[in-house]
Image (cartoon, rainbow, N blue to C red):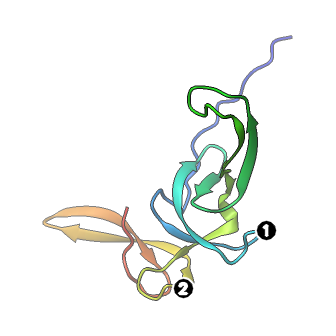
Amino acid sequence: MIKRIKKIKGNHLFVRKGDMVLVLSGNDRGKRGKVLKVFPERNRIVVEGIAFLKRHTKPNQRAPQGGIIERERAIHASNVMVIDPKTSQPTRIGYREITVEGKTTRVRMSKKSGETLAG
């Protein structure tokens, strides 16, 4: 019997690299940080200064001493909320179409203030 591997399509996430987010659940609840990496196929993101992972490493070229190295681990995207740049409050994300010189582009916007978000 042949096992078929299902191809995973990239999910659409409301969070993008560079966004400021507020953590809603987990040990780091209430903390804010910048999104460093996004993994849409797994619905996970890496946030600066949130959810540290301790890794015990042998001495190598990168870490000649070895020892315990701390780095951020991925958390689920549903556990964060984007921060509105205008009000500094957590907000939901919406989309708006803007027409400039006959070209229509879709931009992200804050539901709270209506402010457009970068990216």
Question: In what quadrant of the picture does the N terminus appear?
Answer: top right
The picture quadrant where one finds residue 101 is bottom left
Which residue ends up furthest to the left in the rendered image? 101
Q: How many numbered dots are placed on residues in this image? A: 2
Q: In which quarter of the image is the C terminus?
A: bottom left
In the image, is 65 to the left or to the right of 105?
right
Q: Residue at x 46, y 89 (%)?
A: 87
Tag shown at residue 27: 1
Residue 56: image location, x then y, percent: 76, 38
**Which amino acid is tagged 1?**
Asn
Coordinates of residue 41 in the picture (x, y in percent): 62, 43
**In the image, which disc is placed on residue 89?**
2
Q: In this view, does 108 lie above or below 91?
A: above
For this view, does 113 lie left or right of residue 32?
left
The amino acid on which the numbered mark 2 sits, given as a three-letter code, is Gln
Crowd class of label 1 (few under 14; some 14 to 19; many from 20; radius 10 Å): few
Where 41 falls versus 14 (above or below)? above
Please tell me whether mark 1 sits on a helix, a strand or a loop.
loop
Front position among marks 1 and 2 = 1
Of the pair 1 and 109, the residue shown nearer to us: 109
Quarter location, residue 98: bottom left
The residue nearer to you, when weighing 33 against 13, is: 33
Q: In which quarter of the image is residue 3?
A: top right
Relative height, residue 10 to residue 14 (above, below): above
Instruction: Find the distance from the CA under tag 1 to the CA under tag 2.
Output: 20 Å
Which structural element holds mark 2? loop
Mark number displayed over residue 68: none
Front-most of residues 37 and 9: 37
Q: Where is residue 8 in the image (x, y as percent from the top left)?
A: 64, 36
Q: Position of residue 99 (x, y in %)?
A: 23, 69
Identity of the residue furthest to the front in this view: 65
